[in-house]
Image (cartoon, helix red, strand yellow):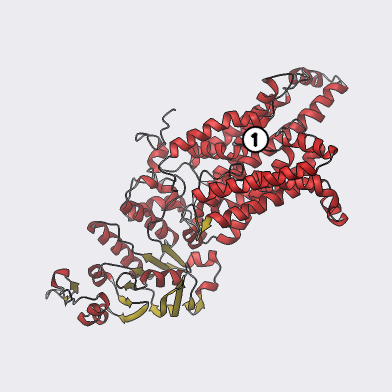
Amino acid sequence: MVALPWGRSAGRGATADRVTGDRSGRARLTILALVVFVMLAAIASLGTGAAGVSLGDVLVKWLSGEVLSVRDRVVLFDIRLPRLLTGMLVGASLAVSGAVMQGLFRNPLADPGIVGVGAGAGLGAVLAIVLGAFLPPAILAVAGMHLVPLAAFFGGWATTLILYRVSTRAGRTSVATMLLAGIALGALSGALTGILVYIADDQQLRDLTFWGLGSLAGASWAKLAAAAPIMVLALLVAPMLARALNGLALGEGAAAHLGIAVQRMKNLAILTVAAATGAAVAVSGGIGFIGIVVPHLLRLVMGPDHRFLLPAAALLGAGLLLLADIISRLIIAPAELPIGIVTAVLGGPVFLWILLRRRGIVDM
Amino acid sequence: MLEACDISVTLGRKQVLHGAGLKAEPGAMTVIVGPNGSGKTTLLRAITGDLACRGSVTLDRQDMHALPPHALAERRAVLPQASVLAFPFTVLEVVRLGLTGRIALRPDAAQLPTRALERVGLAGYGGRFFQELSGGEQARAQLARVLLQVWEPVQDGTPRWLFLDEPVAALDIGHQLQVMQLARRFAQDGGGVIAVMHDLNLTAMFADRVVLMLDGRVLAQGTVQEVLTDQNLSRAYGCRLRVSSPPAQGATYILPQAAEMA
């Protein structure tokens, strides 16, 4: 692994921020670079797919005033564009909920996918798909097409609350307890989901199968419209948590002394994690490792200041998910691999590397 | 003026404080001393709101615990005992966290973290990682953050307060004196300081008022001469201690060599 000048094992580099300790300039540059990265990934994503419609050809046609063929239009605007937007929002949501959760638990290993929040959100989604018809009509009318993402949100919220209560005493989170409780909660959610799959009818089973693949293949404007408002809301709320999460890094007492309304901010953070994870899981199933790998890489580059980390995580999460989606479409084309497999193959080793690097300094 | 009345704290099943109270004036340094387990830190933590307590804490006759966090943060800063930092922040980034409230709006706000580091003798340490510092350096970096939060001891005519929990426990003698002088200067400039201390000699040197605690109660409070007496100290610390003063300056000191163990 490259010895980064700001890494633990690094020598005393002579860069300006190494002297002053101010990494905000570097953070701003990183964010700028990430904006470009996301734009490039978006263009690549629009130009990739089984239909063989090339973005360049379409652009040339469009610029020369030629009318696009129905096929081109359908492929671009009804298949690839909703998929692009879904991928960006899901990636941003997963990365931001990872960063917020790590700040809340004061631990870089907290990730909604690892500690069972994703499974809890999945249980909520499956509950809605299988048993949603039995809900009172009033609730169905209010929830409408948002029923599945809302149910996923409540599932994720309940899991996060239980996890926080179990693993945090007097403002200190035990990593071992958090991870073990996450395993237990994940297994419980998985078992309950299994029971629901048993009692599901054929149509519901089809829905569940498509949903459970962990894929963006089913992305559509309708699905996006159902989940996007919740993800956008969570992404807009997250930056308001930045100062509180920075303060929490010093400990809960110190954060309160800095003037932060700790309890209110913690509740807001839990809601944000649940909303972002829940809506992302509802729309794309389980996509792992984005939430842990993205914030970790960014902390290496620009430090842990959440005022910069949260927007950067949204961008890098969006861009990486688009890249993973492109890979999932190209690698066994014309068939495609579920994106969850791609992120796991890429993210798993990175996660192990993080563990190796941190061994000994993680306060268990 | 800060007044804590009849403070009682129960931790688990054990009552740690039994109606302790103290008065502290701005412009003076008030030091809480007492043997291990006497409730010094608990009293400070009850005053700062870290611990739930019975009794009242008032700041200029306002209920201090009723103030919202951001308003309280403008009035006082708290230096905790050693704490674990969650993420790899640089020293400058840690200090900059103290840049909160109205101080952050000053035109020279960007330079203040560096100046705070200079004050605590950590000039040039900004780029180091907080976790890489020694315990004493971490304590001083935290002090810089706390000093930054209440940078002006008096803001718009209102004195501000520093609460220090064993500020010199991890420090060598040179830095102990430096930190005590910083605290004293903060008080001399009109701010209020309440510190929990172990070292009786530093207390005698720097305190304007001393609060001596024993078994969750205040045994005595007043000036150094009033409180640090042979009788009070021998009773509090469970060994016969003799207070001395060098004839030239008349200052107080307590030599462990002069103690007679019971």
Horizontally, is B144 left or right of A327 in the view?
left
Is residue B160 among the parts visible in the rendering?
no
Which chain does the numbered disc 1 sit on? A
Residue A290 locus on image (x, y percent): 60, 37
Q: Quadrant of residue A138?
A: bottom right
Residue B7 locus on image (x, y percent): 44, 78
Q: Secondary structure at mark 1?
A: helix
Tally the marks.
1
Residue drawn at x 17%, y 69% is B256
Residue B234 locus on image (x, y percent): 22, 78
Horizontally, is A187 left or right of A216 in the view?
left
Up/down of A82 relative to B159, above or below: above
Taking depth in this image into account, of B214 and B163 the one nearest to the observer is B214
Taking depth in this image into account, of A122 and A65 the one nearest to the observer is A122
Residue B194 locus on image (x, y percent): 37, 70
Figure quadrant of the C terminus of chain B? bottom left
Judging by the rendered image, the residue that carries numbered circle 1 is A318
The amino acid on which the numbered mark 1 sits, given as a three-letter code, is Ala
Up/down of B255 relative to B56, above or below: above
Circle 1: is it few (<14), some (14-19), or many (20+) Cα within 10 Å?
many
Residue drawn at x 14%, y 69% is B257
Residue drawn at x 24%, y 76% is B238
Up/down of B139 relative to B51, above or below: above
